[in-house]
Amino acid sequence: MNAQPIHFKPTEGFRARSKAVVDNPFLRQSFRGAMDFLMSKRAAQFPDSEELESLRLLGEQIRQYNLGKLPELLVRLEENLTRNGVQVHWAETPDEANAIILGICQKHSAKLMVKGKSMVSEEIELNHAAEAAGIGALESDMGEYIVQLAHEKPSHIIMPAIHKTKEEIARLFAENVPGVEYTDNVDALIQIGRNVLRQKFLEADIGLSGVNFAVAETGTLCLVENEGNGRMCTTAPPVHIAITGIEKIVEKLEHVPPLLSLLTRSATGQNISTYFNMISSPRKPGEKDGPAEVHLVLLDNGRSQAYADEQLRKTLQCIRCGACMNHCPVYTRIGGHAYGTTYPGPIGKIISPHMLGLDATANMATASSLCGACGEVCPVRIPIPELLIRLREESASAPHANPSMRGQGAGHDGLTSAIWRAWAAVYSSPALYRTVSWLGSRLRGLTPRRQAGWTSVRTPIQPAPKRLRDMIKERN
Amino acid sequence: MSKPRTITPKPSDIYFFATCVVDQFFPGAGMDAITLLENQGIRVHFPEEQTCCGQPAYTSGFPDEARKVAALQLTLFPQDWPVVVPSGSCAGMMKHHYPTLFADDPVRKAQAEALSGRIYELTDFLVNVLDFKPEDHGQDCTVVLHTSCSARREMGVHLTGRKLIGDLAKVTLAQQDHESECCGFGGTFSVKQPEISAAMVEDKLKSLKATGAERVVSADCGCLMNILGHAAWKDKQEGRATPSLPGEHIASFLLRRTAQ
């Protein structure tokens, strides 16, 4: 009930959802303040631009190196995890991933699953599937817990409840947590959440987590977090299920520190996160804690489509820091929910089409001024603007056989294509351009007063009485 | 990002690629840029056959149409002279995207690569090639500078406009909040996502006005069209007869300030 149906089309209603936010001065101010804060935190972590650029270059190289060997590394990861006693499962679709996870739950007659923060679990809408199967799924990351109580989805991949004020959270807790009085004291609110969750960690049959880096050579799952809930989820319940996208893999342990440093500094402006968990096996004989069983679910969900194309593959370099969102003037204006996708913001625009198809996401790529702020801050140098242009092309071109993307041609429209062809005919012919631009200046009085969306907040565009070329001629 | 490159000695001739926006909508800015360059003792050549760099089609996802238009521009600059463009956005297209656009066409790719090295954004050319130090003959005034995203992030020339204005003795350069943020133009973005674009230009105008500057200058006419178009609309809405924030291309501003 707190999830959108999987076949939801994010582009439907996108403009209406965006408008609802930009017309709300309170939300506008609140997003601006939050993003300003996150931008300044990141900036403070990278005082030396040369160090930053060399680290970004290293991050890009590490990600590209590992993606280059992805098929081989996945096999090695599975071998090494299996040797360590971790059970590995492969899921091509969200439905398959849910079936695997629920199958494990049912085998253990599980009633309650506590979840650490995992965007992949949002991607497959696990909470929805678990509830339908009669299994409680409780979010234990504070932000995720808040959006779950509110029956919402995360609006940011790192700060899920960034759209909420402390007063809203206070009301939410007072109304939904038994025996809690209204308080908007942030420390008190956190204590309320922690008290609820602590009990649940002890009761839970299953702990679910995401994975930030999966190390192939050692068979290790790395988990970055700040609240300790990730460690609780992966150690307290008898069964731990980790889920991740197939791209989160690195070959060597030595690849982790630079990526980790880039991740925490870019995401929350922290030098290092409070917790960094490395999970290599279930509980061994003689160990005092840890789950008896550990599972890893590796999800494709469109990633192999991105992988197959040299340019689109760069999408998979992402380490999910969210810096592109924090620096995006569009995200800052409309917030995460307007996108309607699990992953909002610039990364959402380039990854969602692989997960949902271009037909469901065709116009997402148009929601960018191509300002380049995302590409500039991306810690692994994903050329996001270039990929947005590619997606526009894939969407606008006429449908053809063997497309590199599902839903290719979904945004194709004969009239628009004809307009661009006519435009190219004029602008590639000096004679035609001379005539058309001359007519434009002579007939400027006939320029329409209403020009689609442009004149909603601007005066109409009107050609000048004389073109530059006329002025040059007159002068000479 | 391009490193400033100095041609020595100072070129005697240059090509001027005006851009379609300047030719049709901001011809005064183009004329002023040409005059400013000529005042430095340079012969400015304006190839008559020039039209548009092709960026509108390119960024809209129509690379074939962009290629067709770009192919024409490739033929217009036969001499080995610098090509000066009064727009970071169009200069960025020609410098950085032409070589990719013609990746599958060896002849044109070679032409595009050769041209790429000769493309200069106007303020970059003035500062880093001509070492232009404007002598200020105007009255005291405060201006605010808006730098386009392409000039800043694609061309890496966000400091040159700042330097030129800084060199004007009687001009104070105001500092707006969120200076590096996009004005919301983005070509077809402003029409395809008018609500978001409107929110961005509203915020941009507020930031610019909050500085108390008398005018805004920019080296990109796309941004100016957006910002000034919104400013004029707002003035009209609020019943003001004179512009609350006039603006112009940096070439026009520099030319006026340096006029004897």
Image: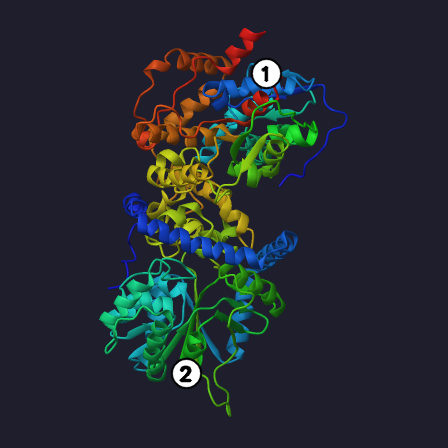
Name the disc covering residue B47, or none.
1
Question: What's the residue type where badge 1 is placed?
Answer: Pro
Dots 2, 1 in contact, CB < 8 A: no
In front of the other: A30 or B42: A30
Element at label 2: loop
In the image, residue A362 sits, relative to residue A151, either above or below, namely above
Q: How is the image coloured?
A: rainbow
Q: Could you tell me which residue is drawn at 42 percent across and 15 percent down?
A: A436
Q: Mark 2 = which residue?
A: A236
The spot of residue A86 in percent (x, y) is 48, 78
The spot of residue A314 in percent (x, y) is 52, 51
**Chain that bears disc 1:** B
* Whether residue B109 is visible: no
The quadrant of the picture occupied by the N terminus of chain A is bottom left
Q: Could you tell me which residue is drawn at 44 percent across and 15 percent down?
A: A437
The spot of residue A394 in percent (x, y) is 42, 41
Report, in whole angstroms, how far the alpha carbon at label 2 lies from the one at label 1. Answer: 74 Å
Residue that sits furthest to the front in the current view: B140
The quadrant of the picture occupied by the C terminus of chain A is top right
Numbered circles on residues, count? 2
